[in-house]
Image: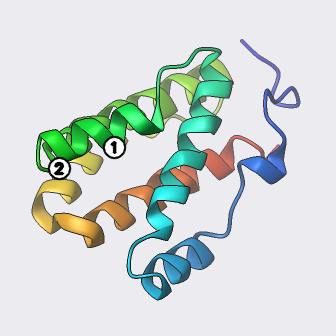
Amino acid sequence: MTSRSATPIEPEMAISEIWIDLLLTFVTCGIYVFFWQARQFRVLNAYLGQERYNFWAWLLFCVLTCGIYHIFNQYMMARSINQIQQERGLLVNTSLPLLSVVISILLGGMFGSCIVDAFHQHEINQFFEA
């Protein structure tokens, strides 16, 4: 089990105010969500100690599959969040992977993606709370 105090990435590079992320996504007509997604990829890769998430590969596969890959990716990110929570001795949100898929499918598009990203960001922010 890893110590909660040891973090592989600076908190300033990982923690964000979710309401600001949502506001910036709305104000930029969705463009900011790409920066938000890239930040979450960096955080998860740092905690996992491997390059599991690649922004450009994700973007390419999302375009090629008309967004279907994004739903799979949201599920995999949620599983990675659960893995990190377990490794760090944090409370594991076991419903996160299923919740990510259901919200992505039911709400779809940018709105569903933002909601799932907000859930993921909330869990990521918890990595840094003692």
SS type, badge 2: loop
Percent x, y of residue 56: 42, 37
Residue at position x 15%, y 40% from top?
Answer: 64
Please name the amino acid that badge 2 sits on.
Gly
Q: How far, Cα to Cα, is label 1 from label 2?
A: 9 Å
118 vs 96, left or right, is: right
Residue at position x 59%, y 14% from top?
Answer: 50
Whichever of callouts 1 and 2 sits on the residue coming sooner in the sequence is 1
Residue depth check, mark 1 versus mark 2: number of the one nearer the observer = 1
Residue at position x 36%, y 31% from top?
Answer: 57
Percent x, y of residue 39: 60, 48
Q: In which quarter of the view is residue 117 placed? A: bottom left
Using the image as rendered, state which of residue 24 and residue 16 is in the foreground.
24
Residue identifier under label 2 = 67
The residue lying furthest to the bottom in this view is 27
The N terminus, quarter of image? top right
Percent x, y of residue 87: 62, 18
SS type, badge 1: helix
